[in-house]
């Protein structure tokens, strides 16, 4: 059997970290995985330490093995090959990992994948399909993205979609998700952490694949393969089958972390932060069970993607940093803070996914006429986008 080819899309902080993780596993299991892991990064010109001239980020990654912009100080494996060319990055791959800020997902597919498929269609004289004509026919995808897709096509019938389903719908590829208590910089330093991977069970018995399904470990649909690819001595993986629960928890905890940042910036201490996290967990679970009824309660309460990720993100993530700075500026008397500008200033080009997720969730709850059912999510939205008074947070949460 040919070893499975792994490709990663995304070279930000978390994308780089996950690319490092899977490259280490590819080196360790050369009979299972092709040793060369291909990696699509958004090309930009940057200056490497001590150099005089800017160079393409892919050149820097391949020659200096360090992502100086998004993950400085971490040596990347030599078997990880960066490119700005999508065809080079994903052609014939068996496992495709998506790890980009979620607001760019649609445009990355439209700008970098759709044109390749169009060209293939012309060559073939029929409509090319993503699986089979571009990536391997049995290829699977794993989404490490955090957020939702709100389908606005029919405003009277708004739909909220998991990003794994969005990928599956756009590219017709079975897509699972990976999420957990994983601050990228700590995983990159190889400090111990856990993560949760979920894969839709229906694909394991997909009729197209039934003959090869699970007969051998070297088939990408075998959950054991996912564990082998992502599990490291410092990064422990549990594979479950609740894609919805893992994705919902991963997305919503970022909103809660913004609120935690607010109370930290206001100087309200640990009790306030704990209260925010408790209410947050309650709303995450309620939202998940209500709008994604396939998700399981235990994922929210027991898995790394659930409560553990909530705790870590509320302690030290990017969302909490932005929320904290927002509140500090508010206390300094600044009542006209543009959250997008603040995000750029605090995170140096990275993004805090809770901001856009807060807008998506609010849009959905407005549509369902249920904002009152989720006081914390609504409070974060009001603070960020409607200039609500942050000192009113306790009364906004006092709804019982
Ligand atoms: P950030 O707040 O740094 O984006 O971290 C979120 C996260 O997913 C941690 O597990």
Image (cartoon, rainbow, N blue to C red):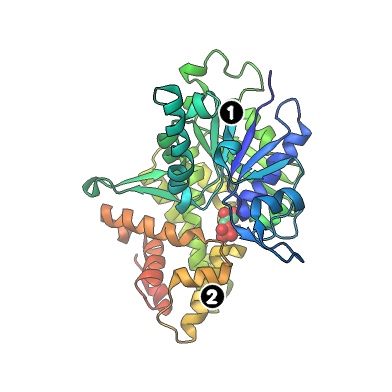
Give the mark nearer the N terminus: 2 vs 1. 1
Q: Which quadrant of the rendered structure holds the N terminus?
A: top right
Ligand 1's quadrant is bottom right
Residue 92 tag number: 1
Q: Quadrant of the C terminus?
A: bottom left
On screen, 278 above or below 28? below
Q: Secondary structure at mark 1?
A: loop
Horizontal placement of 63 versus 123: left or right?
right
Q: Nearer the viewer, residue 378 or 94?
A: 94
Residue receiving disc 2:
325
Q: Is residue 80 left or right of residue 336?
A: right
Please provide percent x and percent y for residue 113. Answer: 48, 39
Identify the residue at horizontal 44%, vertical 84% (top origin).
334
Residue placed furthest toward the left: 156
Residue found 35% across the figure and 59% down from its top:
362
Q: Quadrant of residue 87?
A: top right
The number of numbered badges drawn on the structure is 2
Q: Position of residue 226 (x, y in %)?
A: 63, 33
State the image coordinates of residue 118 (x, y, percent, origin top left).
Answer: 42, 33
């Amino acid at each position: 059997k040919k070893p499975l080819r792994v490709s990663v899309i995304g070279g930000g902080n978390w994308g780089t970290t996950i690319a490092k993780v899977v490259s280490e596993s590819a080196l360790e299991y050369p009979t299972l995985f092709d040793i060369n892991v291909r990696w699509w990064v958004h090309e930009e010109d940057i200056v490497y330490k001590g150099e005089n001239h800017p160079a393409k980020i892919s050149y820097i990654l391949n020659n200096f093995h360090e992502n100086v912009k998004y993950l400085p100080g971490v040596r990347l494996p030599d078997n990880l090959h960066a490119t700005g060319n999508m065809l080079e990055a994903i052609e014939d791959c068996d496992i495709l990992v998506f790890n980009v800020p979620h607001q760019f997902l649609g445009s990355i597919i439209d700008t970098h994948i759709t044109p390749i498929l169009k060209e293939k269609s012309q060559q073939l004289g029929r409509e090319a399909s993503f699986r089979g004509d571009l990536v391997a026919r049995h290829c699977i995808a794993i989404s490490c993205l955090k957020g939702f897709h709100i389908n606005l096509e029919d405003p009277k019938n708004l739909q909220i979609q998991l990003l794994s389903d969005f990928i599956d719908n756009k590219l017709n590829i079975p897509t699972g998700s990976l999420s957990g208590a994983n601050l990228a910089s700590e995983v990159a330093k190889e400090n111990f952490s856990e993560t949760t991977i979920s894969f839709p069970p229906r694909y394991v018995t997909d009729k197209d694949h039934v003959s090869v399904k699970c007969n051998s470990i070297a088939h990408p649909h075998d959950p054991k393969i996912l564990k082998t690819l992502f599990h490291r001595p410092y990064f422990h993986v549990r594979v479950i089958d609740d894609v919805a629960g893992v994705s919902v928890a991963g997305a919503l905890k970022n909103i809660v972390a913004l609120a935690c940042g607010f109370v930290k910036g206001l100087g309200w201490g640990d009790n306030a932060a704990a209260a925010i996290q408790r209410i947050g967990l309650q709303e995450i679970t309620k939202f998940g069970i209500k709008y994604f009824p396939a998700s399981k309660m235990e994922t929210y309460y027991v898995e790394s993607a659930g409560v553990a990720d909530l705790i870590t993100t509320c302690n030290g993530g990017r969302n909490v940093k932005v929320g904290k700075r927002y509140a500090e500026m508010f206390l300094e008397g600044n009542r006209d803070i543009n959250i997008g500008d603040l995000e750029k200033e605090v995170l140096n080009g990275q993004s805090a996914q809770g901001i856009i997720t807060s807008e998506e969730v609010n849009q959905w709850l407005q549509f369902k006429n249920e904002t009152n059912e989720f006081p914390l999510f609504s409070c974060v939205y009001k603070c960020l986008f409607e200039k609500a008074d942050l000192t009113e947070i306790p009364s906004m949460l006092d709804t019982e």
